[in-house]
Amino acid sequence: MLFRKITNSFPQFRIKRDPELCINCRGCINQCSYEAHFWNNARGRLAHDNSKCIGCLRCAAMCPTGALSIQAESGMSGNPSIFKPEFSFHRERLLLDCGQPGSAHGGPGTPTGPSGFFVLGETSRKIFNPNLQKAMEMAAEKLGVVCNPAQAVKLFPSHNVAEVAVAEVCNGAKQLSLEYSDARIPGMPMELALACVDKRLRQEGLRSNVSLIAGGYLRCSTDVLKIIALGADAVNIGEAALAAVGCTLCGHCHTGKCPWGIATNDPKLRKRQNPEVGAEQITDLVYRWSREIGEMLVEMGVDSHKKLCGDRSKLRAVGLSENAMEILEVKHAGQ
């Protein structure tokens, strides 16, 4: 008969504590909301329970002497939204057609304003710190972008998403939001779903009647341009914005005990997020991405992101199947 849980013997993460650097300040106990660290009275020193560690890295980041490190066990993974290949498989195999002989209006490095294609949202988290909601609103006001578009109809990327999108537009929808609603249920790859929706709306003559907002773990400014080229009018960078304020995507938002004070309503943990500081970090992220996007648009020979919307000729594929390239309507690299 088992005398302890299997998870105690096979933890997802292991905490490494350097005894020479650790000064027993107990800061890790205060920082960890999952009680992975504790004071061992028998030995008179700090100890830890690996089975309670979720890999948020809060303790290691806040350790004053750098005595702590977190190691992921072999074969284990953290948040499935990052490590599952279906969330980035098609996007990673798409390339931007840059290095055009001609250039768009303005010299190299001309920045582009973020107001036209960035959307700040809370993603699919059920628990959210009101301080961060305020930070997003402050950043959105400063940047001139949309924050949590209430009028957008959310679509899940499924096999019949194009038919659903047409029906919603016929019913009067002016904005459609296409993104993963749950990291544990990836469904159809968002890139394929977006291409299908954009193509079907154009065939039905409805594309000009609606704005498409796409999202789904966009990691860099290059991802933004790829999604716009596939047909999105704007992109939701909710996950990137949360990463900018400290989210390590540990995948335990449902517990309400986020050590970084993001996915929580605990009064003590909520104080870890300052609205003013959060707004500054989000604003800095969007400004930097906007400048990078402006530089890439110049290299692509495109005047603005609006002209890039749905222009698959600016994309090339490497390593995708013929069926995938047919759905995405992109050519292989070298063609």
Image (spheres, rainbow, N blue to C red):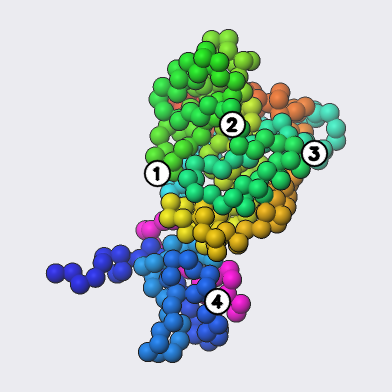
Q: Mark 3: which amino acid? A: Pro
Q: CA distance from mark 3 to mark 4?
A: 43 Å
Separation of residues labelled 3 and 1 (CA atoms): 37 Å
**Circle 1 residue:** 184
Where 155 sits versus 284, above or below? Answer: above
Viewer-closest of 107 and 221: 221
Please give the name of the residue rendered at 68% of the width and 26% of the height, measured from the top-left corner.
Answer: 308
Q: Quadrant of the N terminus?
A: bottom left
**Left or right: 36 in relation to 202:** left
- The region drawn magenta spans 60-78
Contact between labelled residues 4 and 1, with CB atoms less than 8 Å apart: no
> In the rendered image of this protein, does residue 205 appear above or below residue 188?
above
Spatial CA distance of label 3 from label 2 is 29 Å
Q: Reply above or below: 169 against 46.
A: above
The answer to which of marks 1 and 4 sits earlier in the sequence is 4
Q: Give the labeled residue for mark 2.
A: 150
In which quadrant of the rendered view does residue 36 lie?
A: bottom left
Q: Secondary structure at mark 4?
A: helix
Residue name at image x 45 percent, y 86 percent: 45
* Crowd tier of the residue under label 1, counting other residues whose Cα lies within 10 Å: few below 14, some 14–19, many 20 or above: few
Type of amino acid under label 1: Arg
* Count of all numbered marks drawn on residues in the image: 4
Sooner in the amino-acid sequence: mark 2 or mark 4: 4
Q: Nearer the viewer, mark 1 or mark 4?
A: 4
Give percent across and percent down for residue 70. Answer: 48, 68
Q: Mark 2 and mark 1 in contact (Cβ < 8 Å)?
A: no
* Label 1 – label 2 distance at C-alpha: 25 Å
Residue for badge 4: 27
Q: Which badge, 1 or 2, comes first in the chain's sequence?
A: 2
Q: Earlier in the sequence, mark 3 or mark 4?
A: 4
Chain-order first, disc 3 or disc 1: 3
Task: Give the amino acid type for the residue marked by disc 2 in the picture.
Answer: Ala
